[in-house]
Structure formats: C-alpha cells, structure tokens
Image (cartoon, helix red, strand yellow):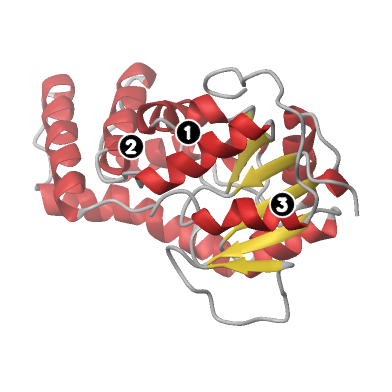
Amino acid sequence: MEPVRAVLFDYGHTLVDFHRTEEALRAAYEQIRARIEAVAYMEVPEILDLIDRVALGLDRLVAESYAEGRMEEIDHAAAFGEALAGVGFDLPADVVDHLIALDHSAFSNSITVEPEVLSVLERLNRAGYRMGLVSNVSLLPHLMRADLQALGISPFLHATVFSSEVKVRKPDARIFSEALLRVGATAPETVFVGDRLIDDVSGARAVGMRTVQTLQFRREQETDARADAVIEHLGELPAVLSRWGGHPAVGSPPDPGGA
C-alpha cells in the first residue's frame, strides 16, 4: 500500500452532527414569512403551514429521491421556488435567493463543531496531509462553504466538493474523482473517512481509496460493506493513518475555504 498523503472527509455525522433544531427552523421561517409579506403584499400562511409546505416539503422530496436510489442531486433553488409557487408566491429571483439563505440559516444556527474535531484537523494539517471534504447535500455550495468558514473547519481543507455543485451523489465515482482532482492526490494514497457504509465506504473503495468508518455521531446498520478501519471518534484517526504509513512531509497550508 502507498503511504497516506491525503484524507477526504464526509461532512454530516462525520465532522459535525448535521441537523436543524425546531427552534432554529421556526426562527428562520418567521423571517421568511415577514420577507414574503413585505414583498408580495399578500396574506402568508401561518408559520407551521409554511414550514410544512416548504421546508418539510423539500425534505420529503429529497428523502424520496434517496429512497428511489437516484444518484442525481436535486436542484435546491428550483425546488425551493416551486415550493413557494405551490403556496401561491411567484417571487423575483433575488427575493427567492434571500429566502433560500434564510431557510439555510436553520442549519447554520443549529450545527456546532466539537473541539476535538478541530484539534484532529489541525494536527493532520500540521503533519502535512492534504485534506478535503465530500458531502451529499442539496443545499447550495456557497452557503455550505460559509458554514464551514464560520465553524472553523475551512482553514484545514484544501478542497470541498458538494453533490449540489457536481450534480451527482456518493457513491457515484464522479464525485470522488472530482474531490481527488481538487485535493491533488491519487486514490491509492488517499483515505476516506465517513459514517455511511454504502455512500462513503463502498463508494470510496470502488475508486481505490482506503476507508475509515466513524461511529462518533451515528451507527449505521450492518451491510455487506466493511471499512478498512472503524473508529469510535475522530481522535482515533491519526493513529490509524500512522499504521498505514501516513507520515507526509509538512506542506504548504491550504487556501481558506477550499475550492
């Protein structure tokens, strides 16, 4: 096996517990409702109805696409506009963009990063590993990158790749190949760290990467897929990389935000 020179991470339930709280969702939709009222001069549905028909409606659309096994990512902006039209609001594009950002804030205001995670990323960065992130998410890439910056994760990443920008989801080989290209590494010298056995483990292994399954935030039911290593929390990762010959020379620091 080649020595490990690069590490790619999943995002949700790998680096952070990806979720949005009911409180944050309601606060976001109070702002959305006020914005629509200011622009449309029309009566707007009650908050809970608006949440159900727009936010939760999009959640259901995404869940259905996963249940159907679709590899193509949903166009979040188009789906959001259609959801608004479904409740009677055909709004200008700039207003829709603002509402999408407000909707996204429910995630931004719910997600935190554990100090241990940042500590591990800093340690790997000092050791010279090239690091990147590969995430299945329909949310808009520029809003996701703003979250990474706010959480303090971006400075450690050389590249970030979202299914919402490359239009295909893990385990499709194309999203992994794009990540390897952006991070500047080959598959045999790269380790992928994630929580999902099919999307992360099987997908990364199919393109030639070694894999680590993390159980820190969730434990997926067993499948035929098996990772090369399993860790309880991210703090165990440096030791795994060391066993696999991961001692690269210290390189240049990554560009903040990772392209």
- Read off the residue under disc 2: 104
Where residue 56 sits: x, y (%)?
A: 31, 55
Q: Residues within 10 Å of mark 3 (few under 14, many from 20)?
A: few
Q: Quadrant of residue 161?
A: top right
Choose the circle earlier in sequence order: 2 or 3.
2
Where residue 164 sits: x, y (%)?
A: 57, 39
Label 2, secondary structure: give it: helix
* Residue 166 vertical position relative to residue 10 in the rendered view, above or below: above
Q: Residue at x 34, y 55 (%)?
A: 57
- In this view of the protein, which residue sits in the foreground, 26 or 224? 224
Amino acid type at image mark 3 = Ser
Q: How many marks?
A: 3
Quadrant position of the C terminus in the picture: top right
Amino acid type at image mark 2 = His
**Distance from the alpha carbon under mark 2 to that under mark 3:** 38 Å
Label 1, secondary structure: give it: loop
Q: Is residue 128 visible?
A: yes
* Residue 28 vertical position relative to residue 234 in the rendered view, above or below: above
Q: Return the residue found at the far right.
A: 1
- Read off the residue under disc 3: 242
Q: Which mark is residue 140?
A: 1
Q: Which mark is residue 25?
A: none
Image position of 180 (left or right of 103): right
Where residue 125 sits: x, y (%)?
A: 60, 32
